[in-house]
Image: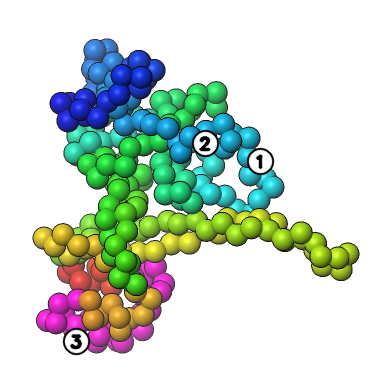
Amino acid sequence: MLAITAIASTTLQAQYSGQVPTNMGGASQNAAAGAAIANFLGPVNEAYQKRREIDLDKFQGSPYTSNTFAPTILKYDDEVVGNIYYRYNALNEEIEIKKTASEEEAYQALVKDKDISLLINAKPLSFKTFITEKNATLNGYLSLIQEGSKYDLYERTLVKFTEGQPAQNSFVAAVPSRFTKFTEFYFQKNGVNRIDQVPQKNKKLIKLLDETKREELKVFLKENNLNIKNEADLKKVFDYLNS
């Protein structure tokens, strides 16, 4: 709680110190959880009102993984803080949260802190530093989809915005602006403070592994006709590596 309190601002404490549902139990603990959650809230890029006015029906796709807020558990340093509602803006890689599902309640941004995680389908979503296939070091949200004895597998959901084009003439239809969602996968070897993107080709993944595993995995991929571009095949590969 001391670590959580250190993040707080007076304004946010005054606005969000009420009770929220929590697994802690007890009225006083509920109030404490509400105050703690307040410490993780902040402005949403100062664009809250603008976002409320956006009609997503005018676009193809969405900047969100889901347009509605869903219940989840907020944890700090693996300790449960309380229950909240969240929505993930994959375009900005930003988590929007609020205490209730009410459409009238203003949402706030979750602080980008690596000790904070949300439980999504019993798997943690958290802020990480990782290395892309192009060797760029980035920060963003990764969801742990497979925890193994030797390797962990993560998923990163991204959204790209493409501006539409008006009709040039009566024979050519206008192209609406659209949000396109896509997924990347990352892995981390246990005991190693580095998260790497899973490349698109089998050969490139093999090169990222320890030399002692490379030939073995090469044979496994060939015998089972696996292609790591396919998510199901990728999970089979990491099941094998963790066996």
Q: Earlier in the sequence, mark 2 or mark 3?
A: 2
Q: Judge whether residue 173 can be spotted in this image.
A: yes
* Foreground tag (2 vs 1): 2
* Quadrant housing residue 202: bottom left
Q: Main secondary structure of the magenta part?
A: helix
Q: Residue at x 39, y 17 (%)?
A: 15
Q: Which mark is residue 55?
A: 1
Left/right of residue 55 with respect to residue 70 in the rendered view: right
Name the residue tied to disc 3.
215
The amino acid type, in three-letter code, at marker 1 is Asp
Q: In this orientation, which residue lies closer to the viewer: 222 or 19?
A: 19
* Foreground tag (1 vs 3): 1
Q: Earlier in the sequence, mark 1 or mark 3?
A: 1
**Image vertical order of residue 110 relative to residue 30, above or below:** below
Rounded to the nearest angstrom, the CA distance separating label 2 from label 1 is 15 Å
Indicate yes or no whether the magenta region holds residue 217: yes
**Image vertical order of residue 112 relative to residue 241, above or below:** above
Q: Would you call the spot at circle 1 few (<14 residues within 10 Å), some (14-19), or many (20 or more)?
A: few
| Residue at the farthest right position | 170
Q: Would you call the spot at circle 2 few (<14 residues within 10 Å), some (14-19), or many (20 or more)?
A: few
* Start-end of magenta stretch: 209-236
- Kindly state the secondary structure of the residue where label 1 is placed: loop
Rounded to the nearest angstrom, the CA distance separating label 2 from label 3 is 52 Å
In percent of width and height, residue 94 lies at 41, 44
Q: Residue at x 45, y 49 (%)?
A: 92
Name the residue tied to disc 2.
47
Say how many tags the image has. 3
In percent of width and height, residue 75 lies at 26, 36
Rounded to the nearest angstrom, the CA distance separating label 1 from label 3 is 53 Å
The amino acid type, in three-letter code, at marker 3 is Glu
Q: In this orientation, which residue lies closer to the viewer: 229 or 56?
A: 56
Indicate yes or no whether the magenta region holds residue 105: no
